[in-house]
Image (cartoon, rainbow, N blue to C red):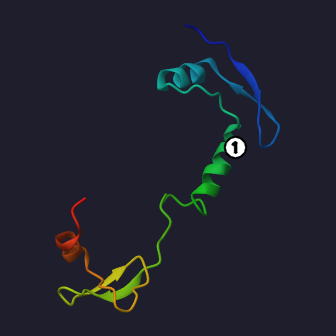
Amino acid sequence: MSFQDKSIQCSDCGVAFTFSGEEQEFFQSKGYTNEPKRCSPCRQARKTERNGNGGNDNRRLREMFPAVCADCGKDTEVPFEPREGRPVYCSDCYNRVKPAR
């Protein structure tokens, strides 16, 4: 099946962009049912916005908190603020004591 190029208006900036036949074929091969709504520069800007400041690391850096493992006593860091009276484990001990799911 041969696809004809389509002109689509970007939902963000309003500029018309071409949705090429090759791109349409690719979308169909992936099972995508919707056409793109944004031009390439607006898609890139949106991706950068979603990923924080545009760095290559897709994960946001988590704030880590110092803690002492309740099982082995080793100094560790955890991604949450430990609370008084609640045990905190290093990753090795946590993997041993975590409840089976």
Residue 76: quadrant of the picture: bottom left
Q: Is residue 43 above or below residue 3?
A: below
Report the residue at 48% width, 21% height from top.
Answer: 29
Using residue 60 as the reference point, say whether residue 34 is left or right of it: right
The quadrant of the picture occupied by the N terminus is top right
Residue, disc 1? 41
For the residue carrying disc 1, how many other residues have a C-alpha within 10 Å: few (<14), some (14-19), or many (20+)?
few
Q: Quadrant of residue 11?
A: top right
Give coordinates of residue 62: x percent, y percent: 46, 73
Question: At numbered mark 1, what does the secondary structure look like: helix, strand or loop?
Answer: helix
- Most foreground residue, 83 or 37: 83
**Where 52 sits versus 5, above or below?**
below
Judging depth in this view, the residue of 78 and 46 nearest the camera is 78
Question: Percent from the top left, x then y, of residue 36?
Answer: 66, 32
Name the quarter where the C terminus is drawn.
bottom left
5 or 10: nearer the viewer: 10
Nearer to us in this view, 38 or 95: 95
Residue drawn where x is 41% and y is 76% of the image: 79
Instruction: From the top left corner, tell me how far across and down residue 35 is, in percent.
Output: 65, 28
Quadrant hosting residue 84: bottom left
Residue flagged by tag 1: what amino acid is it?
Answer: Pro
Residue at (21% x, 62% y) in the render:
100
What residue is shown at x 72% (from left), y 20% (from top)?
6
